[in-house]
């Protein structure tokens, strides 16, 4: 599999490399807190996503905009509020080919569910879907050692939320 952090380009498509709002020092501090102190070191990686902007216009009132990220490797999707501006780079890996139809469908389905919750039952709206564009979302891979434990974690580059990749007890 192609490393999504190597963006040397192939098919002429472009992707946007997003800039993290969480610094390496902040990501390391998240892991140190979880480990009860100790030391940590962070490495920035970028994960490939498709960004789809959904605009819903009701007969009355302002339009609603929903930004959806669809994982280019796994297909899962989520609504996002992160800034989608960044450095334009050549696309590679799963973003080097045009987005499959399933990307726009996944984004429409997720946005539709969110819009139905937002508006009254039976509200009618027209939905416009943007062309999917590749984005490279920043995450920190942080390794750390604390009181009797070593761990490797992913720290989100925008909000600092974190997930354990692996953890081991140490003596």
Image (spheres, grey):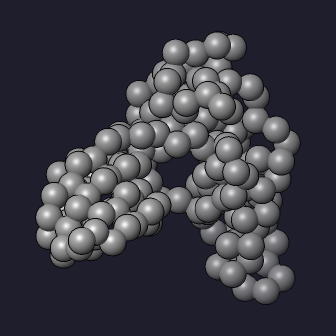
Where residue 135 sits in the image (x, y, percent)? 54, 38
> Toward which corner of the image does residue 63 lie, by quadrant?
bottom right
| Residue at screen point 27% across, 47% down | 42
Residue located farthest toward the front when viewing the structure as drawn: 171
Q: Is residue 162 among the parts visible in the rendering?
A: no
Q: Quadrant of the N terminus?
A: top right
Measured as percent of width and height from the top left, residue 36 is found at 18, 75
- Which residue is at a point 79% across and 63% down the rendered structure image? 109
* Residue closer to the observer: 8 or 135: 8
Could one spot residue 78 in this view of the protein? yes
Nearer to me, 106 or 1: 1
Image position, residue 39 (x, y; %): 16, 58
Query: In the rendered view, does 162 fall on the left or right side of 94?
Result: left
What residue sits 67% from the left and 58% below the top? 77
Quadrant including the C terminus = bottom left
Instruction: Tell me: residue 143, above or below residue 121.
Output: above
Judge whether 150 appears above or below 105 on screen.
Answer: below
Q: Position of residue 85 (x, y in %)?
A: 43, 38
Q: Is residue 110 above or below residue 85?
A: below
Residue at 37% over, 49% down: 141
């Amino acid at each position: 599999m192609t490393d999504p952090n190597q963006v040397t380009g192939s098919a002429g498509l472009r992707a946007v490399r997003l800039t993290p709002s969480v610094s390496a020092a902040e990501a390391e501090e998240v892991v140190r807190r979880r480990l009860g102190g100790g030391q940590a070191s962070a490495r920035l990686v970028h994960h490939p996503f498709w960004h789809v902007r959904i605009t819903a216009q009701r007969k009355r009132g302002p339009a609603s905009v929903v930004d959806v990220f669809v994982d280019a490797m796994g297909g899962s999707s989520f609504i996002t509020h992160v800034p989608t501006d960044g450095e334009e780079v050549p696309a590679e890996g799963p973003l080097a080919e045009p987005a499959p139809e399933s990307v726009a469908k996944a984004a429409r389905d997720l946005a539709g569910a969110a819009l139905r919750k937002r508006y009254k039952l039976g509200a009618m709206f027209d939905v416009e879907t943007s062309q999917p564009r590749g984005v490279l979302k920043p995450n920190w891979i942080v390794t750390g050692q604390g009181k009797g434990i070593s761990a490797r974690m992913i720290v989100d580059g925008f909000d600092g939320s974190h997930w354990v990749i692996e953890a081991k007890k140490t003596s």
